Image (cartoon, rainbow, N blue to C red):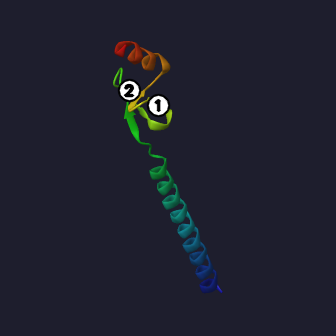
Amino acid sequence: MRLLLLGLVALLAYFLLKKLLKNYQFSRKNQAIDARRMVRCAHCGIFLPESEALTEGSHNFCCREHRELAKSDKG
């Protein structure tokens, strides 16, 4: 009876560890997906995620003010 109980506890521990490892690997994979491409503001040089940048032609800007300043510098 003790051997059967010990076997069941070992089996339960195996499946629990397997599930925890799978969840850990899944979360690590999602962290890699969340990594964003970084771009540089053409005015001040700060880096920011591409999804948050304001784009004007081939240049990226961190805010509207810097985009407008770049336009006024050209003209």
Q: Outermost residue toward the front?
A: 75
As drawn, the residue found furthest toward the right would be 1
Q: From the viewer's perspective, is residue 18 above or below residue 68?
A: below
As rendered, which of 9 and 49 lies closer to the eye?
A: 49
Image quadrant where one finds the C terminus? top left
Check disc 2 and give the amino acid type: Cys
- Per the image, label 2 sits on a secondary structure element best described as loop
Q: Depth check: give the residue in front, 64 or 35.
A: 64
- Relative horizontal placement of residue 27, taking residue 1 as reference (left or right): left
Secondary structure found at label 1: loop
Report x, y in % for residue 56: 44, 28
Do labels 1 and 2 touch, CB within 8 Å?
yes
Q: What residue type is labelled 1?
A: Ala
In three-dimensional space, the C-alpha distance between marks 1 and 2, rounded to whole angstroms, equals: 8 Å
Give the left or right position of residue 44, taking residue 22 as reference.
Answer: left
Where residue 33 appears, as percent x and y from the top left, is: 48, 51
Q: Is residue 57 above or below residue 16?
A: above
In the rendered image, the quadrant that contains the N terminus is bottom right
Q: Is residue 6 left or right of residue 72?
A: right
Q: Quadrant of residue 5?
A: bottom right
The picture places residue 53, in percent across and down from the top left corner, at 46, 31
Q: Sequence order check: which comes first, mark 1 or mark 2? A: 2
30 relative to 40, above or below? below
Q: Residue 53 carries which label?
A: 1
- Count the labels in the image: 2
Mark 1 Cα within 10 Å, few/some/many (few <14, many 20+)? some
- The residue that disc 2 covers is 41
**67 or 40, which is in the foreground?**
67
How crowded pointer 2 is (Cα within 10 Å; few <14, some 14-19, many 20+) is rated as many
Residue drawn at point x = 55 percent, y = 73 percent: 14
Q: Which residue is at a point 47% across and 22% down the rendered structure image?
A: 63
